[in-house]
Amino acid sequence: MEQIVSSGIIDSYFKKIKESLSVDVAIVGGGPSGLVAAYYLAKKGLKVAMFERKLAPGGGMWGGAMMFNEIVVQKGALQILDEFKIDYTHYEGDYYTLDSVQATSSLIYHAGKAGARIFNCTSVEDVVFHNNKVSGIVLNWAPVHRERLHVDPLVIMAQAVIDGTGHDCDIARILERKNNIQLNTVSGKVQGERSLSVDEAERTTVENTKEIFPGLYVSGMAANGVSGGFRMGPIFGGMLLSGKKVAALITSQINK
């Protein structure tokens, strides 16, 4: 019995990772925008793999505000909540409250059921750079990255990569630092995130969701961080809409 358990896990995981060595879209970071993007991309029949550094995907959505596990979503994003079968309650004006644990777990569940492969405890340490285009990611175990062990990585090839790494916008920073290139921002560089302004941030999160270099897209807080937008705190409508927008942009580009 013990051997069956171990063999089953090893054989299944190796099959899953081997089948994900070449994908249509690699998503770095399993926050809400990345999970929404994974769902819509997979629903379109694209081969999608998500790589999350932590044990559980979901980003900052789990904790609500200061560990009060409720979050706010504005009216414009309710259609996404309905599609993911997430319950919500009208609070005031155009704003609704919802349980952060139910919301986050539902995003994960629906992304996986749509066909996206989700790999946790993995860390992306570089990108593949071919012909002045981002063509994949360089992957290692999260503990290897955290402990700074000298262990060489594996490579995942992809037609498109999404930087969904949140406030740090790790992938955009790596690309800029290592390759002497200009990003699709005002300065050509990572602008850096500004302080909190809810209305402004909710708007610009969606506006800043775009392709910032051939093959590399940004979503969620990474989009605002790259383009110098504001942070918004525990309101998540813009994050959800950003994930849907980036999925549409990539689907259109791949279909060309």
Image: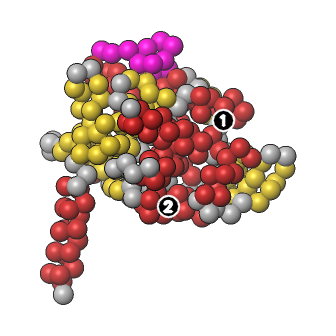
In terms of depth relative to the viewer, which is nearer, 225 or 67? Answer: 225
Q: Residue 96, image x and y in percent?
A: 75, 53
Cα distance in 3D space between marks 1 and 2: 24 Å
Question: Is residue 182 shown in magenta?
Answer: yes
Query: Which label sits in the foreground, 1 or 2?
Result: 2
**Pointers 1 and 2 in contact (CB under 8 A)?**
no
Q: Quadrant of residue 229?
A: top right
Q: Quadrant of residue 145?
A: top left
The amino acid marked with disc number 1 is Glu
Q: Residue 119, image x and y in percent?
A: 33, 55
Q: Is residue 144 visible?
A: no
In terms of depth relative to the viewer, which is nearer, 143 or 59? Answer: 59
Q: Is residue 135 visible?
A: yes
Q: Which mark is residue 76?
A: none
Q: Residue furthest top?
A: 187
At 35% from the left and 30% from the top, the residue drawn is 215
Residue position for label 2: 110
Residue position for label 1: 202
Residues shaded magenta: 180-191
Q: Earlier in the sequence, mark 1 or mark 2?
A: 2
